[in-house]
């Protein structure tokens, strides 16, 4: 009888320990998800501007300062890491002025590159002297919405043109970059310059181009009704995209897409955001166009993944034209709708807003904050509890046997 009881106790302990092993296996590959919390919303740039007029693009420089291209006023402004604003180039039509700046980035030597929709031209500004040199803009109608620079090579996305453009700094000759995209609306380059990431307003997808081989893969953006992709930023293998139509900022981290945030710190929804940039600390700066503000969201920190036996799926290869769903009805309407006029520096003239940006209306419905903390899902506390339970079962079994022997 005692042997039977001991055998049952050992079997129970084996089951408990097996459960502990399963819990450990289930926890492998898991990590704490990274989240973004809106922490700042700039509606003015003291002491140089009492308000933003139409912030169209934003760029976080290497030193952490934030550059803003205000399309219809103020020109190009800079927010230092201490929060003090200054003028890089004023709004206007003069030689050193920015006439409807629609996109902004920096060159490797620290100069500021600005797309001027009003001239149109591409301006290079020396932030120290204020000197400005210009070259021709891409030879198409429409405003440059996104710029990327690798060395002396410039890439430009012009929504409505259907092509991704490239040139050299100082050159007036532009060529196109081959790819499956239908309407590039944003472009970003990897830190080493070997990869370009392109948002496609025509297919509502995001593409990754290997410049060495020409290979292009789709990053599988989760298309949805009303989505209109615009600006894009990258950090390592992670991608950040603004959805101009739905008023959301999306993040692709660890191979999966999720909404990073969709509101300002006060809970008001983003309305037609146009540009996004990521800092060294993983904070995101967004040009919230129709709310006339710059919204900054702070990262909870890059997650530390635990190795998993199951490999993650690779991005799909570029689909054929037949495989990709065409633009939605909303997208088609946005692409052909007349642009909204905005005042420019020239008296009596008007500039235009890129398609997909209408007047401020009700805006997208405010939803729950998407950067909420996730509940703990690891297995750490489970294992000791299960082991303790198994030990108690075994001790109880031994006690039964001892009592029977004394009897």
Image (cartoon, grey):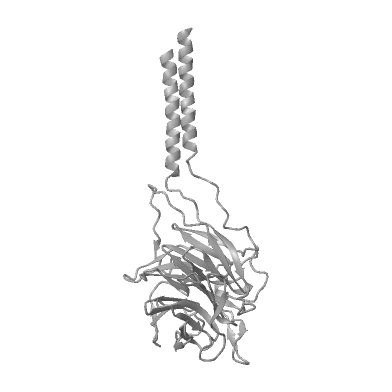
Q: Quadrant of the N terminus?
A: top left
Tell which residue pokes out farthest to the right in this image. 362
Tell which residue pokes out farthest to the top in this image. 407
- The percent position of residue 297, horizontal first and vertical second, equals 56, 63
- The percent position of residue 333, horizontal first and vertical second, equals 57, 75
> Eyeballing the image, is 356 above or below 28?
below
Q: Give the residue at x 42% y 23%.
A: 10
- The percent position of residue 219, horizontal first and vertical second, equals 44, 63
Q: Nearer the viewer, residue 49 or 227?
A: 49
Looking at the rendered structure, the number of numbered marks drawn on it comes to: 0
The answer to whether residue 80 is visible is: yes
> Eyeballing the image, is 375 above or below 218?
above
The answer to whether residue 163 is visible is: no
Q: Give the residue at x 56% y 78%.
A: 86
Q: Nearer the viewer, residue 278 or 199?
A: 278
Q: Nearer the viewer, residue 130 or 5?
A: 130
- The percent position of residue 24, horizontal first and vertical second, equals 43, 40
> Eyeballing the image, is 364 above or below 46?
above
């Amino acid at each position: 009888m005692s042997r039977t009881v001991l055998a049952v106790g050992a079997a129970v302990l084996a089951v408990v320990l097996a459960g502990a092993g399963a819990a450990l296996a289930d926890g492998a590959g898991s990590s704490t998800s990274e989240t973004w919390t809106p922490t700042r919303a700039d509606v003015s740039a003291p002491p140089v501007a009492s308000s933003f007029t139409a912030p169209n693009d934003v760029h976080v420089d290497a030193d952490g300062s934030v550059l803003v291209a205000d399309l219809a006023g103020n020109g190009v402004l800079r927010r230092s890491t201490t929060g003090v604003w200054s003028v890089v180039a004023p709004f206007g039509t003069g030689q050193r002025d920015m006439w409807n700046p629609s996109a902004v980035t920096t060159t490797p030597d620290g100069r500021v590159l600005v797309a001027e929709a009003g001239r149109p031209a591409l301006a290079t500004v020396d932030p120290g002297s204020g000197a400005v040199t210009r070259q021709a803009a891409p030879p198409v109608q429409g405003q440059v919405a996104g710029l990327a620079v690798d060395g002396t090579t410039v890439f430009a996305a012009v929504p409505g043109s259907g092509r991704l453009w490239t040139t050299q700094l100082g050159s007036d000759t532009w060529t196109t970059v081959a790819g499956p995209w239908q309407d590039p609306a944003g472009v970003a380059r990897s830190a080493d310059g070997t990869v370009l990431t392109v948002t496609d307003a025509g297919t509502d997808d995001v593409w990754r181009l290997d410049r060495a081989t020409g290979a292009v893969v789709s990053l599988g953006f989760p298309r949805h009704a009303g989505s209109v992709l615009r600006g894009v930023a990258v950090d390592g293998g992670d991608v950040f995209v603004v959805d101009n139509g739905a008023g959301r900022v999306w993040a692709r981290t660890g191979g999966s897409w999720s909404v990073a945030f969709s509101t300002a710190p006060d809970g008001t929804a983003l309305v037609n955001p146009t540009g996004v940039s990521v800092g060294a600390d993983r904070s995101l700066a967004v040009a919230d166009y129709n709310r006339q503000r710059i919204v900054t969201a702070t990262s909870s920190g890059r997650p530390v993944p635990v190795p998993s036996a199951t490999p993650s799926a690779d991005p799909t290869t570029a689909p054929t034209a037949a495989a990709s769903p065409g633009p939605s009805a909303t997208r088609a309407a946005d692409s052909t709708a007349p642009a909204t006029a905005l005042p420019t520096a020239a008296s009596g003239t008007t500039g235009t807003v890129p398609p997909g940006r209408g007047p401020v209306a009700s805006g997208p419905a405010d939803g729950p904050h998407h950067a909420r903390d996730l509940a703990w899902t690891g297995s750490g506390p489970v294992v000791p509890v299960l082991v303790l339970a198994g030990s108690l079962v075994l001790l109880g079994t031994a006690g039964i046997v001892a009592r029977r022997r004394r009897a």
